[in-house]
Amino acid sequence: MEMLTWVGFAAFFVASSSVGIRLIALWRRNGGIPELLIGVGVLGIGPVGFGSITVGQLLWVDHDTVGRVVFAVGMFAASVGALSKFVFNTYVYHPNSRFVWGIAATAAVALLLCFVWNGLANGYRNISEMDSFYLVRTGLTVACLLWGSAEALRYWGMMRRRVRIGLGEPVVTNRFLLWGVGAGAAGLGTLVGVIAQWWTSLPPIEIPWVMLNSSIHGMVAAVAMWLAFLPPARYQRYVLDRSRSEPLA
C-alpha cells in the first residue's frame, strides 16, 4: 500500500509540475492572464505547496528548523495557489460580477491572515491542532477547487450541446470536462484528509489510509490534467472521432 501511495504522489507531482510550467511558459509567450493564473494555481497548490508541506512534516522529526522553513514555504505557496484559483474562477467565469470579485478579495485577506497566524501561533510547526485559522485556510483551498470544478463542468455541458450542432470545438470542450474532473478530485481528496484529521487529531501524514486516499485522488487529478493540457495525439483523435459519432441534439 505504501508503494501505491507514493506512486500516486509521484504521478501527481510530475503531471502538475509539467502542466504548471507549461502554462506559465505559455503566458510568457502570449500574455494570457488565464494561463498565468491556472499555472500558478496548479504549481502552488500541487508540487510546491503540497510537496513542501509533506517534506516539511517529514523533516520535523530530525531537523526541526529546516522542517519549519520548508513547511512555511509550502503553506505560502498553497495560499498563493488557492488565491490564483479564486481569481481564475472569477476572471474566466464571472468577470463582470462585483459580488464574485468581492469573494475573491475576501479570500485573499483570509488566506494572508491564516498564513501569518500559523507562524505566530506555532512557528509553522504543528498542524495537528485544528484551530479556526487552519480550518479556514483548508476550507478555502477546498472551496476554490470544488467551485472551479463545478464551473468547468457547467461550461462543458453548455459547450457539449454546441459541439453536437457543429458550433463547438470538441478538444476544447473535452478540456473543460477534464479540468472539472481534475479539480474536483483534488478538492475531494483534500476534504477527506481534513475531515480525517479533525476526527483523529493527527496530521494526515500519520494516517496511512488518508495518504492512500490523497494519492488516489492525486492520480485522478494527474491523469485529467495531463490529458487536458498535454494531450497525446491519439487521445485528441479519440475525442474528435467520438464527437463525430454522437447524434445531433
Image (cartoon, rainbow, N blue to C red):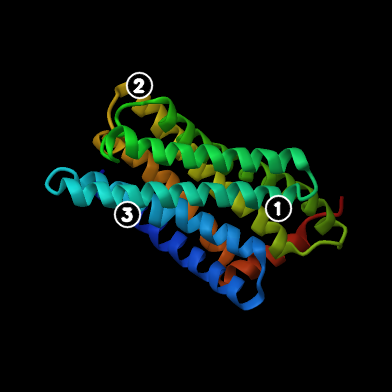
Residue furthest bottom as drawn: 29
Q: Which residue is mark 3?
A: 7
Left or right: residue 20 compared with residue 173: left
Whole-percent x, y for residue 34 in the image: 65, 61
Badge 2 or badge 1: first in the primary sequence: 1
What's the CA distance linking mark 1 and mark 3? Answer: 34 Å
Q: Residue at x 63, y 42 (%)?
A: 105
Q: Amino acid at mark 2?
A: Trp
Q: Which residue is mark 1?
A: 91
Q: Residue at x 51, y 44 (%)?
A: 185
Q: Amino acid at mark 3?
A: Val
Rendered position, 63 above or below 239: above
- Name the quadrant containing residue 212: top left
Badge 1 or badge 3: first in the primary sequence: 3
Q: Which residue is mark 2?
A: 199
Q: CB under 8 Å between callouts 2 and 3? A: no
Secondary structure category for the residue under label 1: helix
Secondary structure category for the residue under label 3: helix
- Name the quadrant containing residue 118: top left
What's the CA distance linking mark 2 and mark 1? Answer: 36 Å
Q: Residue at x 70, y 53 (%)?
A: 91
Left or right: residue 75 compared with residue 170: left
Q: Amino acid at mark 1?
A: Tyr
What's the CA distance linking mark 2 and mark 3? Answer: 26 Å
Whole-percent x, y for residue 119 in the image: 33, 40
